[in-house]
Amino acid sequence: MSADQSQTPAGGPLIPLHCLQQAEPGPPRLAVLPTGTPVWLVTRHADVRQALTDPRLNRASLYAPDAPAVSLIPNILDDPDSLLNVDGAEHQRVRRTVQRAFTPRAIARWRPWVESVVDGLLDELVESGSPADVIAGFSRPLPVAVISRLLGLDGLDLRRLGHWSDHALSTTAYTVEEIVTAMREFGEFGYQLVLERRKNPGDDLVSSLLAAADETGGVSEAQLTSLVCGLVVAGHETTMTTLGNALVYLLGDDPAARTAWDRVGRDEESAAQATEQVLRSIPLGDATDALPGMLRRAVAEVEIGGVTIPAGSVVAADTGAANHDPEIYPDLGGIDLFAPLDTPSLTFGAGPHHCLGAWLARMELESGLHHLARRLPALRLAEPVGAIEWRTGLMTRSPLTLRVAW
Amino acid sequence: MSAAGPDLELVVRVDQTRCVGTGHCAASAPDDLALGPNGRAYPTHPTSTARDQLSEAADLCPVEAITVHLARTGEQIAPLD
């Protein structure tokens, strides 16, 4: 499908995510998934938005008995019990068990506590001294601490979460057998957690989603287990990835980055603006076909961007390309982190499956970047960008470690 | 109009820039909210008395694009917290 842009022509070091070029948007066109299945690649902002909101395109039909193969290897996004793979009234029922906890108002109530976690991590980082690994010291523990508290996972060995998460999002990092084993263990963990919280409810999100599900009915045990596991992975992986990749840019040599770092630390409004632009302009990973969550299937013939797409077709909504659509976001040459976004980006998707955790992610990123920049205005990369060790073989890519100094 | 009395007439507003087209509102309040062809929600009637349904739609909108007001005074009644 889209070319893997991640390596220089000589096969040298991997390019930082903020340097990746996105496909030029155009009318929907036919491409091929790695499975050999034809796919309509949609890239313009308006077309991607339509692909994600039009009721004639959905997720569940991707897993119908007559559906063509879309995944080479099993991954967490193929789970038929996943919130992502049901539509309509059934999807509403499952999503409503947790939606109230993720509205902007509900997430805002967490801000003081999240900021205390940020401060605590910064205290430890400063105490450990320069140079340090900002991934281990900040960008990984922050989202992990937040989701652990939200779900009431304190006391769990957090390395197990990382282990399951890496297997859940693996493309080439692990074998099929390893992935299947890890997903089974992860599912067991989720199931045991559901049983335990039903027996001894607390004030955590798992307990509240179980109570909501019991009240409305129509949500299966498998769907609840899948939801809990989904919250664990989604609740930390993508935030950690975005934060790490943002720091690769912000702490680099580019004078615009130095100015931006300064401003991000100065006031929260600037940090919020920069966060929106980071979310829009820095992709989560390398190639489009590594994000299976962006696939949909047409249940009826549908016209998108002047092209008639037949019923039964698989469609890929390339949010990365849409986020760089020059018709919507004129390319002013270089990254301007403080340009206002007149049109919201499609990073969190659109339509019924719009990212549940969008506001939580935004808050962690804003707060994390603001306080890190405020506390350590002189923070900078302490290794050349070409020497960065990346997490590879996963759907996302971000630094495994990132040596910084101040 | 409605025999329910002026204080029960409600107006629902959708911020179409903020709306991401989840359609959750139309599921909560099917008589009063729908997703249009532009993929954004819109009120299907100028006023309504379906307070519970509209309040739920506003409370659960994933991006807080919906507000519900008393038609007479404009006072916002949802979301509140």
Image (cartoon, rainbow, N blue to C red):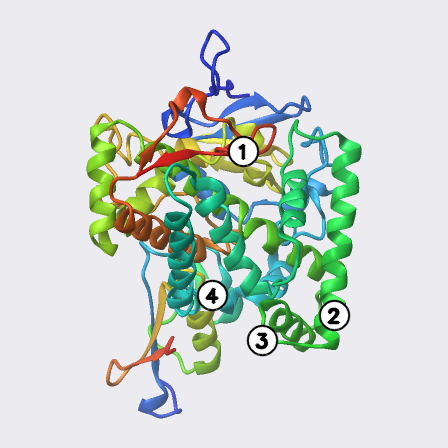
Of pointers 3 and 2, the one earlier in the residue sequence: 2
The residue under label 1 is which amino acid type?
Answer: Ala
Which is closer to the viewer, label 2 or label 4? Answer: 2
Give the residue at mark 1: A316
CB under 8 Å between discs 2 and 4: no
Query: Between residues A71 and A273, which one lies in front from this camera angle?
Result: A273
Question: Is A379 displayed left or right of A220 in the figure?
Answer: left
Give the residue at mark 3: A203
Callout 3 environment at 10 Å: few (<14), some (14 to 19), or many (20+)?
Answer: few
The residue under label 2 is which amino acid type?
Answer: Glu
* Quarter residue A309 falls in: top right
Q: CA distance from mark 3 to mark 4?
A: 27 Å
At x 70%, y 65%, the residue is A219
Give the residue at mark 2: A196
Q: Is residue A340 visible?
A: yes
Q: Quadrant of the N terminus of chain B?
A: bottom left
Coordinates of residue A168 in the picture (x, y in percent): 66, 41
